[in-house]
Image (cartoon, rainbow, N blue to C red):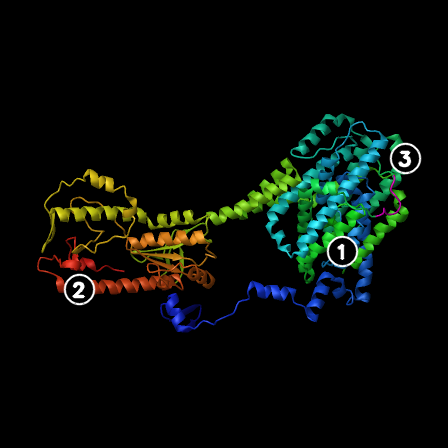
Amino acid sequence: MFEPAESQYVVSRPIYSEESFKRQHEKISRNHKTFFDHLRMFFGCSSEKAKRIAFTFFPIASWLPMYQIKAWLVNDIVSGISTGLVAVLQGLAFALLVNVPPGYGLYAAFFPVIIYFFFGTSRHISVGPFPVLSLMVGTAVLRLVPDVPNSNSTYITTIDAERVNVAASVTVLAGIFQLALGLLQVGFIVIYLSDSLISGFTTAAAIHVLISQLKFLLGLTVKSYSGPIALFYTLRDIFTQITDTNIADLVTSIIIMVVVFAVKEINDRFKAKIPVPIPIEVIMTVIATGVSYGFDFKNKYNVGTVGTLASGFEAPKAPDIKVFESCVADGFSIGIVGFAIAFSVAKVYSIKHDYVINGNQELVAFGLSNIFGGCFRGFAAATSLSRSAVQESTGGKTQIAGLLSAIMVMIVTLAIGFLLEPLQKSVLGALVVINLKGMLMQFNEIPPLFRKDKIDCLVWVVTFLAAVLLGLDLGLAAGLGFELLTVVFRAQFPKCSQVANIGGSNIYKNRKDYRDIHEPQGVKIFRCPAPIFFANIDFFRDKVIAAAGINPLRILRKRNKALRKIKKLLKKGELHITPKGLISTSYDYKESDDEELDNNRVEELDQPINTSDLPIQIDWNADLPNNINVPKVDFHSLILDFGAVSFLDISGMKGLKAVLKEFIKIEVDVYIAGVDDNLLDKLERCGFFDDTIQTSIIFLSVHDAVLHVLVKRNLDSLAKAKEAEVKEKETGFYSDEKNSSIKNRNVNDTISDI
C-alpha cells in the first residue's frame, strides 16, 4: 500500500525474499530469441527489409527527394563556394604533411566528397583532408620512402612518385578496414576511444604538425624523421640550422598568421552579426600569390613554392600490395582515428540540427571514400573541424553544399590551378599552423578534467606523452592500452563499503559518510559496486573479510582445534559434566606430539564443526575451560548488497560460494540482497544453490534482509529464553544433554537486544 503525504511516503508490505515474492507474484513466462532466431531474421527477406536496406546503404535516396529547393538551394550554394575555397587551400597545405606534392591534396579534397555525397548520413560535415590523418599517412610514407640528402631533381621526382604510391596504398588499406568494419556492423568500436583519449591524441598530433611545419615557416631544408622521438630529431636539426632561416619566408609566415588569426577572432566574436564569415584564408592566399609572383620571390629570395600543378586528374591505379604488407597497423589506426574524429563531429551537428546518423553506414561511406580516393592518388580523408564549421555556419543544409565544394576543387584542378604555382610553401605552412588553434587549445581541458576525474585526466596525459614520444601510431596503441587498463583496474579494484541504515529509514549508505546511522546489533552489511569475476574475486573476498573484521577460515580452524581439545579432555576424564556445569580437574593441559602433528592436517580443520557426539552445546563466544582460546565473533548475520553487481562469471561464482560457506560454517547467517533477475537466473542455471546455500538467502532489498534478520533473531531469542526458563535450576546452571551449555550464565543474559 502506498500513502503519499506531502514530501514523504509510507509503504506497507510484507518482508520479501525472492522465494516469498515469487509465491505471491506470478512471473510472466517469456520466450527469448535464440541465436538461430536472430540468424533467421538476419537472412530473412521481405519487401520492407529490402527497402530498409536500400535506404540504409544509399541514404541519399531518403533525403534528396525531400530536398526543399526554394528554402535550401541558395544556402547550399553559398556554403559550397565558401567551403570549396577553404578546401582547396587545406588540400594544398595538408599535402605537405603527407610529404607528397601539393597538387595531390586537391585529389584528396575532391574524390572522397563525391562518394560521401551518395553514402554518408551526415548533412553538415565537410569531408576531405584532416591534419592528424595527413600526418599519420606521412609517417608511413617516410618510413617506407625516407629522405635522401643531396638528391638531384630527377631522383626527387622518382621519390615523389614512390611517396604518392605509398600514400595512396595506405589510404586504400585504411578504407578497406573501414568498409569491413561497417559491413560487419561494428561501428560501436569507436566507443573504446574515449573523449579524453581522442583529445590527448589530437593535441599530440597538433604538436607533431606544428613541428613538421617549422621547416616551411623558416624556409629550412630539414630531413624528415619517423618513429619514436622523431619529433626531437626534427627539433635538433631545426635549431642546428636556425641561422640559415629564409627571412622572406619567416616574414611572410608571421604576417599571414597574425592577420588570419586576428580576422578569425573577429569572425568568432561577431558571428551573430556577420552573415558569412570573412574568407580571410582565401584573401591572404590570393594576396600572397600575387606578391610572390610580382616580386619574383622564388628567384630573388630563393623561397620554396608550390610549383607546377598537374592540370586534370590522373587515371586510377591499383594499390601496391607490398605496401599493404608493410602498413597493416598504419592502415588500421588511420581508419579508426579518421572514423572516430569524423563521427564525433557528425554527432555534434546531428544533435544540433535534430537528425539521426548511422555509425555503421558512416564507416561504409568513409571506407568507400578512401578506397575510391586512394585509387585516384589521393590520401586519407575524414573531416576537418574548420571546414565543417564553415559549411555549417554559412548556412549549409545538406551535402549539396559538399558537392558544390568538390566542384570548386575540380575547377581549380582542371582550369586555374596554374595560378597558384608562385604561392610560397611557407604560406601553406602558416595556414596549417593557424588551423591547429582548436586542437592546441585542448590543453585547457586538463585542469577541469583533473578536478572532475583524475583517471580520465591521466588517460589524457599518458596518451599525449605517448603520442609525442613514440609517434602517432605507437602512441595511439599505448594510449588505448592504458585506457583499457584503467577500465580493468576500476572493475578489479572497486570501492567496496560497509553500509548502515540512515535515519531509521529504508535507505542504506556508507557508514563512514553519515552521523545519524543505525546499525542493528550483530548485523554487518557489505556493498560491492562492481561485477564479480575472475580478476577481482580475491579482492572481493579480502574486502568482505575486512568488513567483517574476522577471517572465517581462521575462526573455523581455531574452533575445530578447540573442539578436539575438549573431546580429548572429556575422554581423559579431565573435564566433567555436572549439574553446576563443566568442571575441569586439570589446568595444565599440553598437546602431545601426535596432536601437534594432527594440527597440520588442514583438510580436517576446514570441515564444518561437528558436535553431534557431545552431550553439550558449545557457546564459542564464552570463556572456555583449560585456557582454551578461540577468537570471538561479535556478529551473527552478514548481508551482501548486490544491487550494483551486473554479472558473475564461473570463477566469481566459485569464489563467492566458498566465502559464503566459510561464514556459514562458523554459524554466521549470510544473505544476498538486490540481486538482478538475470543474475539470479544465471546462479540457478549454474548450480550455485545447494543444501548449504539455498535460495531463501536471497532478498529483494537490503531492508528486507535486515528486517528478516531482526524478526528471526527476536523469535530465536524468545524461544531460547522460554526453554531456558523451564530448565533453569536453582543454582542458575543448566545442563541437560544437548541443551547443556559449556558456560556459566544467567538466563536473562541469553536475551539480547536486536
What is the crowding at mark 2: few (fewer than 14 residues within 10 Å), some, or many (at least 20)?
Answer: few
Dot placed on the residue nearer the N-terminal end, 3 or 1: 1
Eyeballing the image, is 20 above or below 57? below
Quadrant (top left, top right, bottom left, bottom right) of the N terminus = bottom left
Would you say the residues marked 1 and 2 are in contact, meaning their CB atoms lie under 8 Å apart? no
Q: Could you tell me which residue is drawn at 90 percent across and 48 percent down?
A: 415
**Residue 738 visible in this rendered orientation of the protein:** yes
**Nearest to viewer (mark 2 / mark 3):** 2
Amino acid type, mark 3: Phe
What is the crowding at mark 3: few (fewer than 14 residues within 10 Å), some, or many (at least 20)?
Answer: few
Label 1, secondary structure: give it.
helix
Dot placed on the residue nearer the N-terminal end, 2 or 3: 3
Instruction: From the viewer's side, name the closer residue of 395 and 711.
Output: 711
What is the crowding at mark 1: few (fewer than 14 residues within 10 Å), some, or many (at least 20)?
Answer: many
Amino acid type, mark 2: Glu
Where is residue 617? Give x, y as percent.
19, 56
Label number found at residue 116: 1
**Residue 270 visible in this rendered orientation of the protein:** no
Label 2, secondary structure: give it.
helix
The image quarter containing residue 104 is top right
Query: Which region is colored magenta?
Result: 308-315
Label number found at residue 381: none
Label 3, secondary structure: give it.
loop
Instruction: From the viewer's side, name the closer residue of 700 and 594.
Output: 594
Alpha-carbon span between mark 1 and mark 2: 85 Å
Where is residue 723? Give x, y as percent.
17, 64
Alpha-carbon span between mark 3 and mark 1: 42 Å
Q: Which residue is mark 2?
A: 723
Alpha-carbon span between mark 2 and mark 3: 114 Å
Q: Which residue is mark 3?
A: 295
Would you say the residues marked 2 and 3 are in contact, meaning their CB atoms lie under 8 Å apart? no
